[in-house]
Image (cartoon, grey):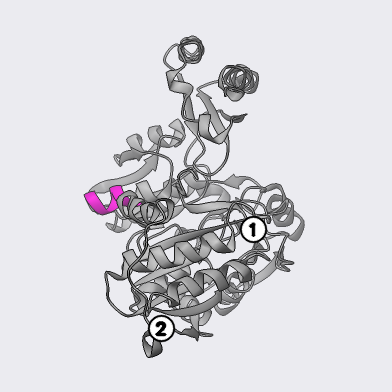
Amino acid sequence: MGKLFGTDGVRGIANKDLTPELAFKIGRAGAYILSNSNRGKIILGKDTRISGDMLEAALTAGICSMGLDVVSVGIMPTPAVAYLTRKYEALAGVVISASHNPGEYNGIKFFDARGLKLSDEMEEQIEELILNDEKIENIPTGNKIGKVIVDDNGSDNYIQYLISTIELDLKGIKVALDCANGALYKIAPETIKRLGGDIVVVNHEPTGMNINQSCGSTNPKEIQKLVVDSRSDIGLSFDGDGDRIIAVDEKGKIIDGDHILAICGTHLKKQGKLKNNTIVGTVMTNMGLDLYLEEKGIDMVKTKVGDRYILEEMLKSDYVLGGEQSGHIIFLDYNTTGDGLATGLHLLEVMKAENKPISELNKLISDYPQVLINAKVKNELKNKYHNNREIMEKIKQVEEIFHGQGRVLIRPSGTEPLVRVMIEAKEDIGLEKIASDLARFIEEKIGMET
């Protein structure tokens, strides 16, 4: 068995890669490492996948077998579990979700007592116990065995918390929502209603398998059409576990994570709340945002792709705003992970405060043309591209085409058997073909290696 934890927990096809047996072991090992021999409770939430019940039962058994109680909060977005872990003073939180992946996938990810994703070192400790089949010398009996506590108040606590973080009256505002048939399918509409907004909602009837199915933040055409057809003031589209968002202005144009950072960062700076005058992005951040922030006198720091790395940088250097182009946005004053619904509320707050249609705010930055193509590579080979001399030479040749006004970024996917090829330039000179040719070249050179 290879490495278990990717960039966002353990993930795979449920009952094939991620089995109940493995979930039980993850529960035991996670409880052992995170509890540090203390008794207490772990918050457990899940998205709407049919396999969630199966994995919850196995994971819960593993945690309870270590003498810890499980507080089951049911279907709950990832950021809500991070918040509830702190609110309920739990030892840890755990989410059963595969985020934006299709319905047959599922995953397990942990938060520590502070609501922070685990460090690489802590994940490695959990992995070592499982992969080396190390026996955990902790077998409680009698009344020392953990129990399950079903909590029905988590959703309401989370909604109330979100509303407490903003000053927002949505009376007269129409909001279109695409809930991706995921964890926000009830919470997002209810939150907008409580704030007085009118709503039109799609993909809020989960079947257990239709999560992210041609909908949600990874398929924004649906929310674009809904906004235009319903004449909404803004559209908010989430992923399966609710930690990311892609918004749409009233004209149907996409507001991705880079645009959200520009809009919210500018507003925070105007209010004197952009701590240390810095926004944290990633290597995927569009060069258009770099230029805009430079004009506004705002600094930018870039990390590896993954909101966990953004968060690490924010905590280390005392920054309050960071995010990814894909829609993971962290407002550290309010939560410790990407929060799609909270981000949507902050966008609405800026729109109301500026008294402008969201399309006006969406014009703050001019994107450089950017193309992303996936090269299909076996999981165990996806990190080998930089050791292949021919691939590195090919990348160098492509970069020379742009004469310093473009770039090539190659990175292995953290959760799938893919190498992602991103090409960005000031002008589109056939970027899709250039990226596709490079992706196919990578497939030819390392995709079939044995």
Q: Point out the residue furthest to the right here.
A: 229
- Residue 109 position within the rendered picture, expressed as x and y whole percent measured from the top left: 46, 59
- Residue 83 position within the rendered picture, expressed as x and y whole percent measured from the top left: 40, 71
Does the image show residue 225? yes
**Residues rendered magenta in the picture:** 311-317
Position of residue 37 relative to residue 378, above or below, is below
Position of residue 89 relative to residue 181, above or below, is below
| Numbered disc 2: secondary structure | loop
Q: Residue at x 38, y 54 (%)?
A: 267
Residue 9 or residue 216, whichever sits in front: 9
Three-letter amino acid code of the residue under disc 2: Ile
Does the image show residue 346? no
Q: CA distance from mark 2 to mark 1?
A: 26 Å
Q: Residue at x 67, y 69 (%)?
A: 199
| Numbered disc 1: secondary structure | loop
The circle drawn on residue 145 is 2
Three-letter amino acid code of the residue under disc 1: Asn
Position of residue 123 relative to residue 25, above or below, is above
Q: Which residue is mark 1?
A: 15
Q: Main secondary structure of the magenta part?
A: helix
Left/right placement of residue 91 relative to residue 238 reads left
Position of residue 154 relative to residue 143, above or below, is above
- Residue 445 position within the rendered picture, expressed as x and y whole percent measured from the top left: 57, 17
